[in-house]
Amino acid sequence: MAGLFITFEGPEGSGKSTQVELLRRWFGKAVVVREPGGTALGERIRDLVLHDRAMSPAAEMYLFMAARAELLAEQICPALRAGESVIADRYHDSTLAYQGGGRGLETSWPTFFPKPDRTYLLALPPEISLRRLSDADRIEREPLEFHQAVAKAYERLAAAEPKRWMVLDATASPEAIHEIVRSDLAGFLKRSQPSSS
Ligand code: TYD
């Protein structure tokens, strides 16, 4: 299986990391990245943006995007160019949902950020996801209304690009979700490969 770019999105506590790990095992060989972070600069930005004191919404957005630009340059783009698959735990849709939907900023998709082939939204009502949090960071500590706006933004993003997104019920078991992801990817690969007949 070669060269797919797959992203997982959703709120805190929706089980993204578990799905990323299950999928990595299924792929055997894939580059796995987590945002924000994954590079030396990205880890410094992660620390600033998640653990520092308040900052302006726009500064927050550009910090997330700067970390992403570095991750693309160092890891995602070289891997995709080499024909490897990349599985990302959050990507630019997080910025559109959190800084766009949550903070109300105007957002856009930079042309040099590649679009994922498939994006899985692990949908979970904010009331449940906030209950699952143990050690909340600066963004997770935002009020319920913020997280409701993020959830709505994710719904809108998924509805606007149904070919790229698949919405999954994050209250289902990790194994059941993984099954759906696997069979969806198998179908996706079949559709994207030219038929031999
Ligand atoms: P993290 O600890 O990685 O949480 P999670 O397990 O939920 O991914 O924290 C990432 C936090 O940063 C999370 O609250 C979402 C937020 N975030 C943004 O607001 N914008 C972004 O562009 C990204 C990548 C994350």
Image (cartoon, helix red, strand yellow):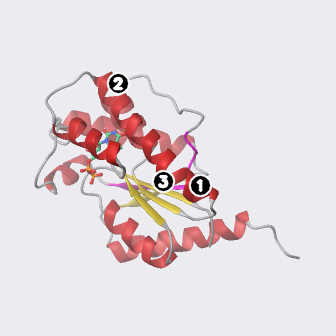
Q: Amino acid at mark 2?
A: Gly
Q: Is residue 32 left or right of residue 76?
A: left
Task: Say whether disc 3 or disc 2 marks the residue closer to the N-terminus.
Answer: 3
Beta carbon of the mark 3 residue lies under 8 A of ligand 1: no
**From this viewpoint, which residue is outermost toward the left?**
134
Q: CA distance from mark 1 to mark 2?
A: 27 Å
At x 15%, y 54%, the residue is: 133
> On the image, which quarter does residue 58 sit in?
top left
Q: Position of residue 84 (x, y in %)?
A: 58, 65
Q: Give above or below for 90 relative to 110.
A: below
Q: CA distance from mark 3 to mark 2?
A: 30 Å
Q: Magenta span has 15? A: no
Q: Residues within 10 Å of mark 3 (few under 14, many from 20)?
A: some
Q: Bounds of the magenta span? A: 113-123
Task: Say whether disc 1 or disc 2 marks the residue closer to the N-terminus.
Answer: 2
> On the image, which quarter does residue 145 sit in?
top left
Q: Nearer the viewer, mark 1 or mark 2?
A: 1
> Of 49 and 191, which appears nearest the observer?
49
Q: Position of residue 185 (x, y in %)?
A: 57, 68
Q: Secondary structure beneath disc 2?
A: loop
Residue 104 numbered tag: 2
Task: Say whether disc 1 or disc 3 marks the residue closer to the N-terminus.
Answer: 3
Q: Position of residue 119 (x, y in %)?
A: 50, 54
> Of 52 and 168, which appears nearest the observer?
52
Q: Which residue is denoted by mark 3 in the rendering?
A: 75
Q: Nearer the viewer, mark 3 or mark 2?
A: 3
Q: Which residue is denoted by mark 1 in the rendering?
A: 117
At x 59%, y 55%, the residue is: 117
Q: Amino acid at mark 1?
A: Asp
Beta carbon of the mark 1 residue lies under 8 A of ligand 1: no
